[in-house]
Image: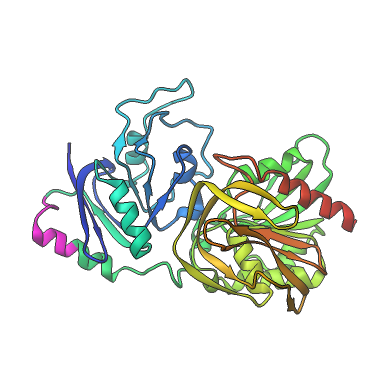
Amino acid sequence: MTDAILVLEDGRTFRGEAYGKVGTTVGEAVFATGMTGYQETLTDPSYAGQIVTMTAPHVGNTGVNGEDDESSRMWVAGFVVRDPARRPANWRATGSLDDELAAQGVVGISGIDTRALTRHLRERGAMRAGISSEPGGWGEDAVDALLARVRAAEGMTGADLAPQVSTREPYVVPAAGEKRFTIAALDLGIKTATPRHLAALGVETHVLPSTATAADLLEHGPDGVFLSNGPGDPAAADYAVAAVRGVLDAGRPLFGICFGNQILGRALGLGTYKLRFGHRGLNQPVLDRVSGTVRVTSHNHGFAVDAPLDRATDTAHGRVEVSHVGLNDDVVEGLRLLDAPAFSVQFHPESAAGPHDAAPLFGRFVDLMEEQR
């Protein structure tokens, strides 16, 4: 096996073995708490620029297949696991995770204490990191050189990544069966499961690039507008904020998820801020304050909306209230306009790779469009 090293920007070092491509990479070190769903995580555009540590100890058991990708490629900057599977064991597998990481150029590391790394990131916060498995990368000079490279890299604050992961050209995902509605989706890093869920409800989705304007989104008279998930700092995406304000001015039904929730918040005049270590995984409990129910949800966000939990906020588009709250730390997990047909959630209702508690939110969007007809 080829030796590998992981260096955090505060100087802490972990030594292990190469996993995936042999090389060097730099990104933001984060951790994801899902026990399953590594293929969906790797291909989720929201993880662009991040070195993802899997807290589940055994990764790669089910290999990879041609059905579970959430985009056309892997987007993570790097991948960290403790015990990689020696061989895949699943009837759907078409190859091993190790080979697929190498084929797609993802530099990873295995055999390190991921529990210790996760605890460190929880205590110190997400930070820049580097992985290197190149020959000679273990010596003190090489470690110092990698650390210098890590510290010189740009952080996630201020990063405008949505245009890098968005579609370059518009495309259409047709409804499954009878078409009931047509929507325009602003692709800030959309996952393939999202238009698939909408298609099952009779929705035809016109996916537009992240820099589309309000006029672009409304050009063909859609019944509603959808704001997707995506990577980066929402404070750097002024183009998307301007587009959403135009949609709100037009009074068109709007639904946003994840990054789209943050963009809606900023369009309403609310602030956003960077979380200490973020929420990533498939097991995050969220309170739906409207229904009083708790849903276990899929998350990937390092930023959050800054809004009061105890009252509605007056905005240029009417009153907005916090509709969902994270039960681990009281982070805003959803917004609902009281005087306009718009709402958003910070988590992923398309539930790839699970759970399915929040899937009915797509039905709520359909109901909202039906009401506004």
Q: Nearer the viewer, residue 210 or 265?
A: 265
Q: Residue at x 46, y 73 (%)?
A: 158
Q: Residue at x 69, y 69 (%)?
A: 244
User: Can you see residue 266?
Assistant: yes
Part of the protein shown in magenta: 136-145
Picture layout, residue 67 above or below residue 279: above
Residue 216 in which image quadrant:
bottom right
Q: Nearer the viewer, residue 135 or 345?
A: 345
Left or right: 178, with 4 as reference point = right
Q: Nearer the viewer, residue 37 or 329?
A: 329
Residue 254 in which image quadrant:
bottom right
Left or right: 301, with 201 as reference point = left
Q: Residue at x 61, y 55 (%)?
A: 169
Left or right: 182, with 35 as reference point = right
In the picture, the quarter occupied by the C terminus is bottom right
In the picture, the quarter occupied by the N terminus is top left
Picture layout, residue 318 above or below residue 225: below
Q: Residue at x 64, y 54 (%)?
A: 287
Could you tell me residue 71's position as x and y percent? Answer: 53, 45
Could you tell me residue 237's position as x and y percent? Answer: 56, 70
Q: Residue reaching furthest top? A: 91
Left or right: 229, with 338 as reference point = left
Could you tell me residue 90's position as x and y percent? Answer: 44, 22
User: Can you see residue 28?
Assistant: no
Q: Main secondary structure of the magenta part?
A: helix
Q: Nearer the viewer, residue 46 or 262?
A: 262
